[in-house]
Image: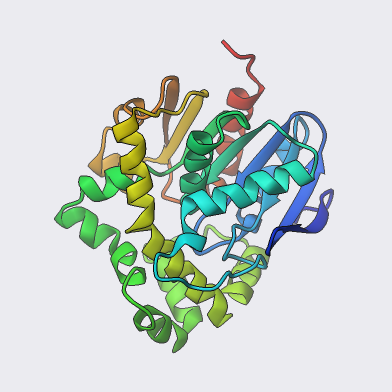
């Protein structure tokens, strides 16, 4: 995996971020979801690297990146702080302006980045999410049961950490493969589990979800009240066999947050880059390579 990419550990303030860099052309940042690492892009990044300088990172708190200490307000794991770290990574690599695609939690970091740093983000793609505040505001029984882990992981420490810590391999496999599907490459699973077995990773993931249920919603609400919108072009992709297709008019939700929105579902579940890598790469390439309108 990532044979033509170089490996880096990039220091941004007190945080160290693991990154892979490959290709040539306009810069494109790829952000992963939970409970994964940048390795989730291994089937898509090489195709994109034929056209772009691709930077795939581990989010703060995930993979081999730093796990900042927990605080009462969970601020280190707010999507604002995580986005700030990624902008700093891109600047250290010489990219003042860049495009970004994020899946799952990485999508939440990515849209927060577009709102907080509009001067940096030229195009945005989010995979299988709606905005965090919208998800909680629209939540009901189906949301609570389908996204049970949002509420479990957000419980006060050390409840989820202790329970997951009894058998992290079992929890990871249950969380990612509750429906029968073999979508992950063995080498990818090895990286995911190697990181997930670290109690500090589990703590950091829980902090991410605590921030999501608290400070991230506050940031979303403040943007809505102030009338701030995503100004750059936005591509939204989601799995036709995942939850968004059942619960929302996904494009309509995003059109309430952004000025220039397009997208569609792919015939897969939640893990688009691993379930439908060729189609995901094709959609991202068409969007990011297109000239601005």
Near-viewer residue (292 or 262): 292
Percent across and percent down for residue 2 are 77, 53
Image quadrant where one finds the N terminus: bottom right
* Tally of numbered discs: 0
Image quadrant where one finds the C terminus: top right
Near-viewer residue (271 or 138): 138
Left or right of 42 in this view: 70: left
Q: Quadrant of residue 99?
A: top right
Q: Is residue 289 above or below residue 49?
A: above
User: Which residue appears at 48% of the width and 68% of the height?
Assistant: 205
Q: Is residue 250 visible?
A: no
Q: Is residue 39 above or below residue 49?
A: below
User: Which residue appears at 40% of the width and 72% of the height?
Assistant: 174
Colour pattern of the rendering = rainbow
Left or right of 15 in this view: 102: left
Percent across and percent down for residue 156 are 33, 76
Near-viewer residue (214 or 152): 214
Left or right of 50 in this view: 148: left
**Residue situated furthest top in the rendering:** 293
User: Which residue appears at 28% of the width and 64% of the height?
Assistant: 148
**Residue situated furthest left in the rendering:** 141
Percent across and percent down for residue 244 are 32, 43
User: Which residue appears at 69% of the width and 44% of the height?
Assistant: 45
**Residue situated furthest bottom in the rendering:** 166
Percent across and percent down for residue 84 are 59, 48
Q: Is residue 100 visible?
A: yes
């Amino acid at each position: 995996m990532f044979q033509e990419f170089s490996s880096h550990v990039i220091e941004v303030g007190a945080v160290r971020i693991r990154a892979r860099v490959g290709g040539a052309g306009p810069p494109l940042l790829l952000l992963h979801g939970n409970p994964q690492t940048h390795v989730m892009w291994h089937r898509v990044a090489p195709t994109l690297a034929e056209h772009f300088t691709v930077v795939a990172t581990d989010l703060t708190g995930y993979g081999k990146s730093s796990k900042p200490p927990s605080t009462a307000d969970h601020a280190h794991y707010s999507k604002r702080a995580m986005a700030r770290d990624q902008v700093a990574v891109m600047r250290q690599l010489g990219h003042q302006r860049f495009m970004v695609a994020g899946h799952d939690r990485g999508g939440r970091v990515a849209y927060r980045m577009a709102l907080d740093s509009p001067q940096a983000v030229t195009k945005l793609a989010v995979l299988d999410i709606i905005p965090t505040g919208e998800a909680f505001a629209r939540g009901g029984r189906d949301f609570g049961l389908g996204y049970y882990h949002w509420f479990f992981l957000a419980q006060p420490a050390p409840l989820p950490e202790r329970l997951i810590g009894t058998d992290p391999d079992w929890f990871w496999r249950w969380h990612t493969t509750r429906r029968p599907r073999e979508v992950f490459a063995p080498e990818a699973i090895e990286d995911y589990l190697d990181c997930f077995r670290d109690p500090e990773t589990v703590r950091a993931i829980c902090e991410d979800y605590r921030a999501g249920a608290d400070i991230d919603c506050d940031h979303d609400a403040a943007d809505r009240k102030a009338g701030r919108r995503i100004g750059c072009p936005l591509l939204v992709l989601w799995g036709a066999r995942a939850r968004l297709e059942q619960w929302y008019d996904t494009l309509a939700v995003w059109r309430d947050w952004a000025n220039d929105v397009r997208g569609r579902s792919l015939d897969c579940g939640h893990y688009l880059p691993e379930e439908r890598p060729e189609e995901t790469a094709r959609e991202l390439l068409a969007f990011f390579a297109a000239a601005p309108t």
